[in-house]
Image (cartoon, rainbow, N blue to C red):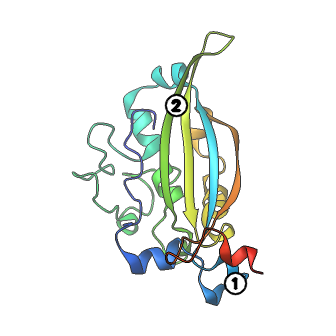
């Protein structure tokens, strides 16, 4: 995303227990029975203001994201997957309080419920009618609760410095149906039998 690694702090999709907690709708959520095993999906098409971003000094870009652009490591750390220790940086001297990574995932007990599985897909459509590059990201995320996941994270990101460089231009909220259980099942069977 804008030259930075994306998805570094994603939950481990190979961890079935974590996916059950983060992604899949479960029976204890008081959702309709046909949703159990499915997931709420948020999709956002985000256009980048590439020319503006490219004129922004590297140090400022890294401060905005809270990561080193080359390694992907959180600022003050060495490796991409190092976990930032915000408790030891309460004033945001190393990783700014309004950095993207700190706002998106503050790593508190309260923010644990807003984890989501997300993927970004880059797009490039040439240039706009005004001669600006038309490129950006198709952002897709999955969570067991849209309000606790995507919408809560978006509220935390409201007003972040990155907003100057990105512009949401489309998207929506959807539901990904539970998968097929066996050879006698079909997609959407629980919904259609209601």
The disc at residue 33 is 1
Q: CA distance from mark 2 to mark 1?
A: 37 Å
- Percent position (x, y) of residue 86? 40, 64
Taking the spot 50% from the left edge, 49% from the top edge, the residue there is: 100
Q: Is residue 192 above or below residue 76?
A: below
Where is the C terminus found, in terms of image quarters? bottom right
The disc at residue 59 is none
Residue nearer the viewer, 56 or 127: 127
In which quarter of the view is residue 16 placed?
Answer: bottom left
The disc at residue 123 is 2
Side of 3 relative to 22 (left or right): left
In which quarter of the view is residue 15 placed?
Answer: bottom left
- Percent position (x, y) of residue 131? 62, 9
- Percent position (x, y) of residue 142? 56, 62
Taking the spot 56% from the left edge, 51% from the top edge, the residue there is: 140
CA neighbours of label 1 inside 10 A, class few (<14), some (14 to 19), many (20+): some
Side of 38 relative to 65 (left or right): right
Q: Secondary structure at mark 2?
A: strand
């Amino acid at each position: 995303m804008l030259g930075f690694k994306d998805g570094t702090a994603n939950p481990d999709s190979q961890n079935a227990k974590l996916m059950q907690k983060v992604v899949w709708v479960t029976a204890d959520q008081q959702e309709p029975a046909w949703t159990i095993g499915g997931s709420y999906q948020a999709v956002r098409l985000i256009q980048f203001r590439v020319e503006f971003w490219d004129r922004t000094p590297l140090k400022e870009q890294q401060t905005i994201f809270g990561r080193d652009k080359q390694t992907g490591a959180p600022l003050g750390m060495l490796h991409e997957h190092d976990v930032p220790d915000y408790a030891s940086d309460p004033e945001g001297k190393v990783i700014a309080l309004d950095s993207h990574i700190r706002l998106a995932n503050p790593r508190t007990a309260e923010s644990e419920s807003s984890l989501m599985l997300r993927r970004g897909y880059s797009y490039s459509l040439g240039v706009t009618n005004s001669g600006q590059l038309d490129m950006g990201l198709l952002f897709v995320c999955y969570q067991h609760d849209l309000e606790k996941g995507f919408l809560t994270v978006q509220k935390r990101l409201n007003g972040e410095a990155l907003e100057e460089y990105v512009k949401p231009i489309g998207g929506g909220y959807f539901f990904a149906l539970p998968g097929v259980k066996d050879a006698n099942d079909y997609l959407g069977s629980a919904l259609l039998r209601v």
